[in-house]
Image (tube, grey):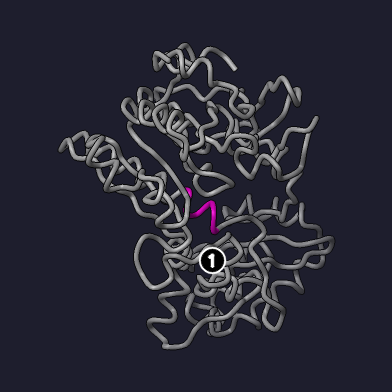
Amino acid sequence: MPDTAAANETRQGPLSGITVIDLSRILAGPYCTMMLAELGARVIKVETPGRGDDARHYGPFVNGKSAYFQSVNRGKESIALNLKEDGDREIFGKLLETADVVVENFRPGAMDKLGFGWEALHAKYPKLIYASASGFGHSGPEMYRPAYDMVVQGMGGIMSVTGHPGTPPTRIGMSIGDIGSGLYATIGVQAALFHRQLTGEATKVDIGMLDCQVALLENAMMRYFTSGTAPGPLGARHPSITPFEAYETQDGYIIISAGNDALFAKMADGMGKPEWATDPRYTTNDLRNQNVDAIKDEMEAVLKTNTTAHWIAVMDKAGVPCGPINNVAQAAEHPQTLARNMIVNVEDPVTGPMRVIGNPVKISGFEDPDSREPAPNLDEDRDAILAELGD
């Protein structure tokens, strides 16, 4: 790791000059603080002595260092503090004196027991923004229950609309419970920073993972509100737009998203079936939704006569949104992914060179470098941080 003070001076981004004290662990909170770091903030990760963040012990590992941990903690600094010991509590207090934001994802009440809850910190550090990302937030009958991503995916309804009809419950293939709450926490922190700039007032950001899952249900929740019936899984198709799903071709599948009548007509022309656009079953999106199985059967009868690559070329020429179903490797190596700097490099002294995901937030006036600082080893920056604090 470079010298912490020098690194802070050279960090670029709209949040340059903002210091975040990161008490969070595993994924939701660390994802939030990683995004804040990507936007220019300095993030000092406070970890448990000896063990550190639990994510340090999750694979895959490279030369004994967790790539999982690397993925959401790159570019941060690490100091190990036991917040139950007087000496470390004093150091923590000094960190808070110059910090703008503290982020934690403990169960409600845990920080209060340590004497570092919102009320206590706000009284002592009135300019400090406090952000919490917990399973169920800091109110409500479930607030003290523990939760992981899988728990809130189940409770939040998102698993009930994932997969194909009649199949067992299916987890979304990434940690949408953690990542969703991490993103909402990032939004909340930035809003709180803006509010503080306008009014001088620091606020508490209270994020519940379950809340975030409910918020992400958008169309599914509205279908329940308007119909009174809870929707179920539909496989790969959109519940309100047709054609808008994965269709079988001669050698695989193609995604076709003809989201309005004009696009449907272009698609029909491209497939050599212009009569579909005037077929009374298909003239409007509502009618196509009512006849979704019929139009799928007709489309696949045509699509199966040629390859996915052929039909992507046809749809591109017609101006119809479409695409293949890439696996993770194909998505990572896609020319568009690479052109947008979405795969960046980390030079880690333990693991050697590693590739990690880049920052999707591109902001004019700020560079988007093709490399990042590595995730710190546990307590790696202790001496430099203590020197800054005058200890």
Q: Where is residue 318? Give x, y as percent.
A: 60, 54
Location of residue 324 with respect to 294 vertically, above or below: above
On the picture, is 87 further left or further right than 327? left
Rendered image quadrant of residue 303: bottom right
Q: Give the class, few, some or many, for how many residues have Cα within 10 Å of label 1's Cα (few <14, many ≥20).
A: many
Q: Where is residue 196? Give x, y as percent.
A: 22, 37
What residue is shown at x 58% (from left), y 67% (from top)?
Answer: 151
Location of residue 82 with respect to 144 vertically, above or below: above
Residue at the bottom extreme of this rendering: 228
Residue position for label 1: 152
Please say whether residue 337 is visible from this viewpoint. Answer: no
Chief secondary structure of the magenta span?
Answer: helix
Q: Where is residue 365? Give x, y as percent.
A: 39, 22
Residue at the left extreme of this rendering: 199
SS at mark 1 in the image: helix
Range of residues picked out in magenta: 177-182
Q: Is residue 179 a member of the stretch shown in magenta?
A: yes
User: Of the residues shown, which amino acid type is indicated by label 1?
Assistant: Val
Q: Nearer the viewer, residue 318 or 66?
A: 66
What residue is shown at x 76% (from left), y 52% (from top)?
Answer: 309
Rendered image quadrant of residue 17: top left
What residue is shown at x 72% (from left), y 19% (from top)?
Answer: 349
Location of residue 86 with respect to 250 vertically, above or below: above
What residue is shown at x 60% (from left), y 80% (from top)?
Answer: 292
Q: Which quadrant is the C terminus positioned in?
A: top left
Q: Is residue 80 a member of the stretch shown in magenta?
A: no
Q: Nearer the viewer, residue 238 or 97?
A: 97
Please say whether residue 235 is visible from this viewpoint. Answer: yes
Residue at the front extreme of this rendering: 86
Q: Where is residue 191? Give x, y as percent.
A: 30, 43
Q: Which quadrant is the N terminus positioned in?
A: top right
